[in-house]
Image (cartoon, helix red, strand yellow):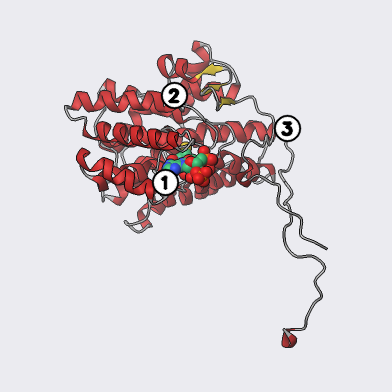
Amino acid sequence: MTKPASTTGAGLRDVVAAPSSICFIDGEKGILSYSGYNIHDLAQHSTFEEVVFLLWNGRLPKRNELDAMNAELVANRALPPGIISMLKSFPKSAVPMDTLRTAVSALAFYDPERSDNSLDANRRRALSLTARFATLVAAIDRIRNGKEPLDPKPGLSHAANFLHMLNGKEPMDVEARAFDIALILHADHEFNASTFAARVTAGTLADMYAAITSAIGALSGPLHGGANEQVMRMLLGIGSPDKVDKFVNDKLEAGGKIMGIGHAVYRTEDPRATHLRKMSEEIGKRQGDTKWFDMSHRIEEIVVEEMNKKQKPIRANVDFYSASTYYMLGIPIDLFTPIFAVSRISGWTAHVLEQLGNNKLIRPRSEYTGEMDLKYVPIDQR
Ligand code: COA
């Protein structure tokens, strides 16, 4: 039998894998909305907590509903002491994303409803995971630096409390709001690699911890959430604005990729990058040093221009300007991707809940391109 030629597009681009009412993207027009609300409106007017409610419930909350959910988030922020002891036992050199993945998996041990995979139990789990992710990431950083983790502060928003637990001081309002907007922008993005990984795992009826652990693994890769760290390492490696042009041109000529640029779905500006670009510039101006913004902007200009010439119109994605934004907020580089997870846990859990609400095992087929009907040859005759 002859081998069939492969007709399957690599990477499942543009394949619609399932219906979903959580997130909409129009990659041609650069539109992103959560449950019908445009990301620009949400970034301008909403809060991360309100967006979490929206993703889980498909509608914006009334005041009393938001207050009740906030109270639950605050009540669930603390980590089980066993998790703190476990974090302390890890090597100080452990990569935070690996520590997060392992700790989230271990959270399953401390779930009093462990054997209950009902939707109600999973909604409670979604809430406690979302509340705890921020505490976990801050604790991971403090413990590896030989410090005790700080208790969450009930009066602070999710964003402000995270920065407080990380830095040991309450952030300025403007910093807390910048971080809050970054959390809103990263909260969901339909069937991206990590969300799809979470849905595939949840679809087997494995528990939510297994699904979220799968998602963290997928997010850690440099082609997905790991790109923001790589962008900052690139900026630091380039060092100064006068070296940008040569670096980028050499890289593109050698066929290399510039991290934080390009997207599997957007064919125009990633609407999240619009906000992060502005944020990066504003923080730089406020701090009296726009070097990282200026370098990023120049890199973007060159890549866009060069790739346009080659008829490959690519633009900055969400990771490009989040790198300089986080760096200027004083966040360590290897926490950039865990921070992505602090936000994306809301979207992951929303998708797991949606998957479980109408579950079907996700099991695609492959297009076989290997040999057929070969005759088995005993090992000594090969
Ligand atoms: N730098 C240079 N060239 C790039 C590029 C980048 N960051 N991203 C894409 N290209 C090139 C591709 O190599 C491709 O060229 P080819 O046709 O000669 O192979 C062309 O642009 C079109 O790529 P496209 O089909 O739009 O991208 P993709 O769907 O294959 O890949 C990404 C999407 C995100 C994986 C890719 O853009 C990338 O690796 N970006 C850097 C990593 C990153 O920022 N990831 C975070 C995503 S949110």
Report if the beta carbon of the residue with label 2 is closer than 8 angstroms to ligand 1: no
3 vs 1, front mark: 1
Whether residue 110 is visible, yes or no, is no
2 vs 1, front mark: 1
Say whether residue 58 is left or right of residue 287.
right
Q: Disc 2 residue type?
A: Phe
* Percent position of residue 352, x then y: 62, 36
Residue displayed at 46% across by 23% down: 49
Q: Which label is found at residue 48?
A: 2
Q: Disc 3 residue type?
A: Asn
Report if the beta carbon of the residue with label 3 is closer than 8 angstroms to ligand 1: no
User: What is the residue that sits farthest to the left in this orientation?
Assistant: 288
Q: Is mark 2 on a helix, strand or loop?
A: helix
Q: Determine which residue is flagged by label 1.
A: 257
Report if the beta carbon of the residue with label 1 is closer than 8 angstroms to ligand 1: yes
In the rendered structure, are the residues bearing label 3 and label 2 in contact, judged by CB atoms less than 8 Å apart? no
Q: Is mark 3 on a helix, strand or loop?
A: loop
How many numbered circles does the render carry?
A: 3
Q: Which of marks 3 and 2 is nearer the N terminus?
A: 2
Q: Which label is found at residue 358?
A: 3
Say whether residue 76 is left or right of residue 237.
right
Identify which residue, 30 or 17, lies in the foreground: 30
Residue 231, image quadrant: top left
* Percent position of residue 221, x then y: 47, 48
Q: What element carries label 1?
A: loop
Q: Disc 1 residue type?
A: Lys
In the rendered structure, are the residues bearing label 2 and label 1 in contact, judged by CB atoms less than 8 Å apart? no
Packing grade of label 3 (10 A; few <14, some 14-19, many >=20) is: few
Residue displayed at 59% across by 44% down: 197
Residue displayed at 72% across by 62% down: 370
The N terminus - image quarter: bottom right
Q: Distance between the residues labelled 3 and 2?
A: 27 Å
